[in-house]
Image (cartoon, helix red, strand yellow):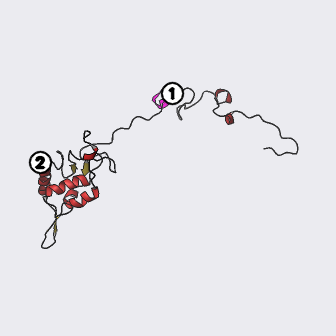
Amino acid sequence: MSGIPFEEWVGVDQHAARLRAGDSSVKPLAVRVMFAAIGWSNLIGHAEFAAQGLANILLSSNPRTGELSIPSRRQVNAAIRRAEEMGLVAEGSSRFCLLAPDWWEKAGGTGGKTCTHHGIRPRARRDKRSPAQHGDRDKRSPAPGQILSRPEPLTCANVTPLYDSDLPQPTTSPQPGRKPA
């Protein structure tokens, strides 16, 4: 989507999309599936749902009695297939994870970059270990815990001072009648 001019972009309120997904007056059910995919989409375009989560969002109400009914698994699956055919959700969507349509991209905001249903785990972060932890130790400043034991006790002779305050200070004996500083 990188070749699209700025003037052709539009923002979507995910909260409003969630409301549309749960609005039983929005027809057909495939359009509500698209609103659910967009409304609950994370940063990589995946909207995960619990076993009955999507069905509970796609409730329908009887206009005469106001009675709510949960669509069957078959009805939900048929609505997802129809939404795929119409290009409203991406191929590979299921009642456990709706994939946002290819024409939709989330830039910023909240949401993770994982999908348990599709087996997408967080990418391994770049290795931020110090060179000392890689084995390329710096002779002057070893990493903490790198030296397990020293053959001889640490003395001022084999330590490079970093600051003047680290240098040994001359000791002066206090003059009679004065308190030591």
Residue range corresponding to the magenta coloring: 131-142
Residue 135 is one of the magenta-drawn residues? yes
Q: Position of residue 159 (x, y in %)?
A: 64, 29
Q: CA distance from mark 1 to mark 2?
A: 58 Å
> Mark 2 belongs to which amino acid?
Glu
- The image shows a total of numbered marks equal to 2
Of residue 163 and residue 121, the one placed in the foreground of this image is 163
Q: Position of residue 168 (x, y in %)?
A: 71, 33
Residue 110 is one of the magenta-drawn residues? no
Q: Quadrant of residue 124?
A: top left
Reading the image, the residue beneath label 2 is: 85
Specify the farthest residue to the front: 7
Q: Element at badge 2?
A: helix
Reading the image, the residue beneath label 1 is: 137
Q: Position of residue 140 (x, y in %)?
A: 57, 27
Q: Element at badge 1?
A: loop
- Horizontal side of 144 relative to 163 (left or right) equals left
Residue 174 in sight: yes
Task: Tell me: residue 94, above or below residue 132.
Answer: below
Specify the farthest residue to the bottom: 65
Identity of the residue drawn at 21% across and 45% down: 103
